[in-house]
Amino acid sequence: MAASAQAGPFTGRTAWARNLQTPLRRFLRTETGSASVLLGAALLALLWANVDADSYASVWSTEASIHVGDAGITMDLRDWVNDGLMAFFFFVVGLEARREFDVGELRERRRIALPLLAGLGGMAGAVTVYLIINAGQSSAAGWGVAMSTDTAFALGLLTLVGPRFPERLRTFLLTVVVVDDVVALVVIATVYADTVDRGALAMAIAFFALLPLGVRLGVRTGLYYLAAAAACWAALVASGVDPVVVGLAAGLLTYATPVGRSDLERATDLFRRFREQPTSQLAREARVGLTSAVSPNERYQQLYHPWTSYVIVPLFALANAGLTLNADFVTGAVSSTITLGIIGGYVVGKPAGVAGMSWLVTRLSRGRLRPPVGWASVAGGGTITGIGFTVSLLIASLAFEGEQLDEAKLGIMTAALCAATITFVLFRATSLLSPVRRARALLGTVEPIVDLAEPVDLERDHWRGPADAPVTLVEYGDFECPYCGNAEPIVRELLAGHGDVRYVWRHLPLNDVHVNAQTAAEAAEAAAAQGAFWEMHDLLLTHQDALRPRDLHGYAEQLGLDVERFADDLRHHEGADQIAQDVDSADLSGVSGTPTFFINGRRHHGAYDIDTLTNEVKAARARAAVSGPVPSAGSAPR
């Protein structure tokens, strides 16, 4: 049942872009925007502290209390930001790390080991350089200041100064900085904690245990988890252990799962029942059904991530980045071992540790474990980890005070500026390489994760374009789906502009919402039996509002098909088996809606506009040039 055909000249373009972003891409996009807000807040803090240092200190030292009966917590505003609001920031970081672990790049477990070890190597390198510079001095106790990377700044600035398409670099870097955060919070909770109240700590552990217990018991009420986390946080405050650790731990416990087609069908059924009988009870059931179809990880990210990125982290910068600069201070800080140790740790030790550990693991494992990107990306990822701000300032406020704290702040800010500049220069130099060498340097040769469970079979699938194309675009579509109809002109334009792309259509009729979808798919198969699949495909997507049986017979006549044979095939559902196979492959690949695209076997989660798809095709072509295209079943070997 080969349905091969050379793509003809396609015309037409739509401005529509279905804004379906993965959590990772939303995360990175938010970090990119928030990096500028964070920078603005840091500059505002510097301006404020230098214009009126007294008011700056006075505002953030103002005490605020929360009391419930005889129990209560009293802290100044800076501590409420550092210990309270920042717990939400680390919660979001934990959410994203868990999402990548469950459904992202790190779902293939062997890919975790190298970035994890690279993160530890980077921290060890930074701490070692700091300790060497501060050897024999009391300032050596502040070694924790130089160990952790700022997630928001690093990911945001990498998007601004880094390469265009190695998204695996961002995933690699996210794993590295999460390791940083976990270890740094452990250090805060142990090394830099005051005298620990063991009774309060035991209570905090008991409250925290309620979180995984609730997950295990299937508790879906958010209030339960909020109450348990708040109680744990309060107990940690009383124990003397920095309470922000509970945020990261809670985020790492929040599972992520793709939306299942059965969940969507159930949600559709609940909404249909409400539409037929709009009562408050059915409205509540429909709302609960829609909410439960999406994993709690994604729901909480959508809820908290913008707040943490655009409000909480900038507020933290405003509260902690204030530094009074004058000639005497700067002159002394330039020769301060604290300042030099932090700069050396971040600018030299951190990238050397990340790149060195990545190389060592690759060498010792004989290539079985290797970075998901090329060595230029590893080096650039290492240099960008030299941006330490949030956790560094947090530890600096615990390790130092007075002038030493100001010297640490200056070192942190200087190191961040140097790290961003070095990263920009490194990637700019990489862009001067030839296309093939640049692709190898940025992307490496590691095999990408293939999300498409059923590989393309040129003997079975319907495809158009070159048989030996280095890039294959697979679409799971529904002829009655309006989004598929809007996507069709974009696909045509993509094929017209890229002669080395093979396009494959697979059926996924959403029968619960589109009453004519199954019949239209069977009509396409009936046309395929007469060698006219693509002609029928184009007609069906052009006339999505006319897919009743008499319309389908009219299209068959319009295409000059044997109408009697076409009608007989429809009546006996001759194409049902092919459609069922496509639906089964969609289920195996985790497809839950239409249109869903796969590019060289990798699921495309971005917007479906021409610019986004073009960039993804270019990235897939570059990867294919380095490691070869994803093979297709039934095709001749390259």
Image: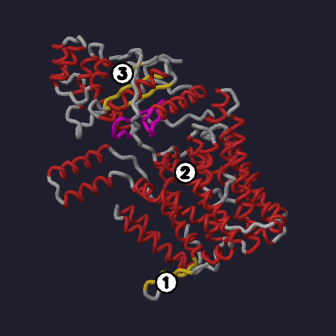
Residue segment shown in magenta? 590-609
Query: Residue 462 got which mark?
Result: 3
Report if residue 40 lies within the magenta region.
no
Mark 3: secondary structure: strand
Position of residue 29 relative to residue 431, above or below, is: below
Could you say where residue 545 lies in the image, as x and y percent from the top left?
Answer: 22, 30
Nearer-N-terminus badge (2/3): 2
Q: Nearer the viewer, mark 2 or mark 3?
A: 2
Residue 601 within the magenta-colored segment of the rendering: yes
Farthest front residue in view: 51
Q: Position of residue 626 (x, y in %)?
A: 61, 28
| Residue at (57% x, 48% y) in the render | 112
From the image, tell me which residue sits under label 2. Answer: 33
| x and y percentages locating residue 235 in the rendered image | 51, 77
* Residue 72 tag number: 1
Mark 2: amino acid: Gly
Of 298 and 402, which appears nearest the observer? 402
Looking at the picture, the colour scheme in use is secondary structure
Q: Is residue 280 left or right of residue 60?
A: left
